[in-house]
Amino acid sequence: MTDPVVIAIDVGGTGMKCALVRPDGNVHHTERHRTGAERGPEAVTEHILEIAGGLADRARADGLDPHAAGLVVPGIVDEAKGVAVWSSNVGFRDVPMRALLAERLGMPAALGHDVRAGGMAEARLGAGRGEPHVLFIAIGTGIAAAHVVDGRAFAGAHGAAGEVGHVIVRPGGPPCLCGSRGCLEAVASASAVGRRYAELSGIADAAAFDVAARAAAGEPLATAVWTEAVEALADGLLTAQALYDAGIVVLGGGLAEAGEALLVPLRTALDQRITFHRIPRLVRAQLGDTAGCLGAALLAQDLEAR
Ligand SMILES: [Zn+2]
């Protein structure tokens, strides 16, 4: 009997991370591809199906048995129906991805949301291992969260749970892409930190990571911008903690690359705000940018377990 593997694909705005994953979580093979979102959603969909087919062929050529597939995408995802409802950066509008994938591959398939899948992977395989109540927060271009309980991420009634990036932390503050003002992600996402520093300093291409480094080196302007972001994150996190009472908060995405330069002041800012809340452990994600892909593999493996 040949060894089983699942096909895992994480579609992002610019790139796709793909893998063949064994039941014990070991990765047999990985591939990366461009998403090519500029070619439109139909072309992206066909590209995903071709890549999935190629991965199945590769598994068989390696003497393995590809028996299920997991695909995760950004935006709003109806996991129960298997439909990519809406995604601003890939352009999906009501694409029945799960059915298309299952039909193309002739095997069971699962469709999930990138951040929720990444949170599941961190909870089961990464920084949240052993903790039943995990809140994973990805801080990159935007801010999104996954609430994972006993290894399962909650999608909400409409596939739109976990949007902590749009908790308003600074009423009347900077405009957010969602149309509101003062949302957490408009103040404290990696993009917002870079933008704010650029505005104040005139240095156009400042990344959040540079701002953290400059702040650590004692530069006053960078320190002010970084502190502003950390304070806003603490406010957002306090709301999240009031709602979820997480045992551990796992921070991922570009901003978390700052490591202790983020975690130390954030813990202090959170401690200063806590009233009745129970303080969660605050840690950095462990799986990096492979979390979404590993989460896609878990979704595929969970199909078997059902
Ligand atoms: Zn918003």
Image (cartoon, rainbow, N blue to C red):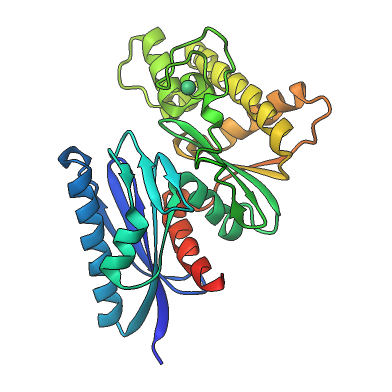
Q: Dividing the picture into quarters, in which one does residue 101 lie?
A: bottom left
Residue 170 pos. (x, y %)? 57, 12
143 and 52: which is toward the camera:
52
**Quarter of the figure that contains the C terminus:** bottom right
Above-or-below relation of 64 to 171: below
Above-or-below relation of 257 to 188: below
Left-right relation of 48 to 248: left
Q: Dividing the picture into quarters, in which one does residue 92 lie?
A: top left
Q: Dividing the picture into quarters, in which one does residue 66 lie?
A: bottom left
> Which residue is at 20% across, 55% downward?
46
> Which residue is at 45% across, 63% downward?
297
Above-or-below relation of 70 to 11: below
- Residue found farthest to the bottom: 1
295 and 139: which is toward the camera:
295
> Which residue is at 57% across, 60% downward?
125
Q: Is residue 217 visible?
A: no
Residue 8 pos. (x, y %)? 38, 62
Residue 171 pos. (x, y %)? 57, 10
> Which residue is at 20% across, 44% downward?
36
277 and 216: which is toward the camera:
277
Left-right relation of 173 to 107: right
Residue 233 pos. (x, y %)? 59, 25
**Quarter of the figure that contains the N terminus:** bottom left
Q: Is residue 21 visible?
A: yes
> How many numbered circles does the render carry?
0
